[in-house]
Amino acid sequence: MRWIHWFDELTIADVPQVGGKNASLGEMIRELTAKGIRIPNGFAITAQAYQAFLRYNELEESVGKLLNGLNTRDVNELLQRTGEIRNMILAGDFPDDMRTEIVSCYGELSQQYGATASDVAVRSSATAEDLPTASFAGQQETYLNVRGEAMLLESVKKCFASLFTPRATSYRTDMGFGHFEVGLSVGVQKMVRSDLASSGVIFTLDTESGFRDVVFVTGAYGLGENIVQGRIAPDEFYLFKPTLKLGYQPLIGKRLGSKELRMIYDEAGNKLIKNVAVSVEDRTRFSVSDEDVLELGRWAMMIEEHYSAKRGTDTPMDIEWAKDGQTGELFIVQARPETVHSQHKMTTIETYALLEQGQILALGLAVGDKIAVGKVRVIPHVSHIREFQPGEILVTDITDPDWEPIMKNATAIVTNRGGRTSHAAIVARELGIPSTHQDHDERGQSRSGL
């Protein structure tokens, strides 16, 4: 095939063709499934296909003109120009041979899972994504519970267009990547029915201190997008690596998250997915069992050991997992190098002097290790980000990657929801911006009173 590779045909060396996300899935399927780690199957539409799509629709010159001289610090200009680029891509057509390959491979994947039109996740995988030095976390789009040929083709086109979201365009500029140096591959992967169970994120270190002898597992009910987009505070678990390697069960700490929402399939409605409220009874329980956490911890260490050996250097990992509510099986759906503490080299120590004792106004889950001072700016919705001024402290309900164009101009960030493993928290750490997510009890009420 010209435009597509199945995951089991790929290795981590194929990042230039299929991006970091898809190359990592191929690497794990080839090397780690024999060791008992389950990864859903799928295929990758190559970055070369994305480039051919632009050429076929004669978009390269028009896109280049809109990017030329773009000031990503000017939010209004950024929103206008990137919106025009996305509209041009969405109006484009697939070359006939590309469309045929995508439809054919989708049919084959559906047959593998005994379905006529299987439910799949359609994920963007940029060729500069998931690098050890830059995560590009959440910069492009993902579409869940995609079913049928027409919906799949439309979702692929939306992924192509998402290379030019304001957040992705701004992030490339800040990280020193040329806009045409980055290609966009699309992964089509069988869904795990975690809408009927739970899912979460794993780090093979402590995300705040960088301590390397723990595995940090988070989990919540339903599909994992609520965690990675910072909409909820998940359950948290800590495992001690040295004794886990020896076969013990070292669950050294766990914390109950508020888990206010559960993302599920929208079976009866006109959306792909939807959020529903979680009952108080379920919120007072952990979303994942201790046994599953221990299994996930063992898998996480195996993944870390494999990538460390592959790269020839210690490689802490950022991993996404899901549990299938129909079969009870655990799956790994993504894995990437951790990009903050693995690159951090302590050269100076910052000291702070407390001049007076102030009144504590709010408590929360801290991200980062700095203290910030500034004027507070409350932004109720992403549509109001034009009101934000550089140097202010951003206060809002949640900060998902759509907020990145102003996050980089903030002195600090305070949100009412989210967790330490959300994409927004990852980006805030990369940018060196302190942030905090308000702490909620099991009824979803802020313990700080906000």
Image (cartoon, helix red, strand yellow):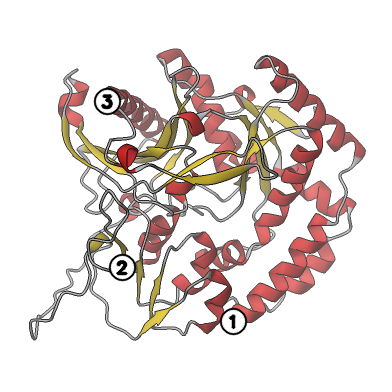
Q: Is residue 218 left or right of residue 351?
A: right
Pick the residue in front: 284 or 11: 284
Residue at (89% x, 34% y) in the render: 97
Judged from the image, the secondary structure of the residue bearing numbered disc 3 is: helix
In the picture shown, does residue 18 fall above or below 430? above
Q: Residues within 10 Å of mark 1 (few under 14, many from 20)?
A: few
Q: Is residue 176 left or right of residue 133?
A: right
Q: Position of residue 151 (x, y in %)?
A: 76, 40
Q: How many numbered marks appear? A: 3
**Mark 3 or mark 2, earlier in chain:** 3
User: Which residue is identified by label 3?
Assistant: 294
Residue at (67% x, 45% y) in the render: 271
Residue at (59% x, 75% y) in the render: 72
Which of the 4 image quarters holds residue 350? Answer: bottom left
Q: Residues within 10 Å of mark 3 (few under 14, many from 20)?
A: many
Q: Quarter of the image containing the C terminus?
A: bottom left
Q: How far is mark 2 from mark 1, CA to CA?
A: 23 Å
Judged from the image, the secondary structure of the residue bearing numbered disc 1 is: loop
Q: Kindly identify the amino acid type of the residue bearing the numbered disc 2.
A: Pro
Q: Position of residue 285 (x, y in %)?
A: 28, 36
User: Which residue is identified by label 1?
Assistant: 74
Q: Kindly identify the amino acid type of the residue bearing the numbered disc 1.
A: Asp
User: Which residue is identified by label 2?
Assistant: 434
Residues at marks 3 and 2 touching, judged by CB atoms closer than 8 Å: no
**Residue farthest along the right direction in this orientation:** 96
Q: Kindly identify the amino acid type of the residue bearing the numbered disc 3.
A: Leu
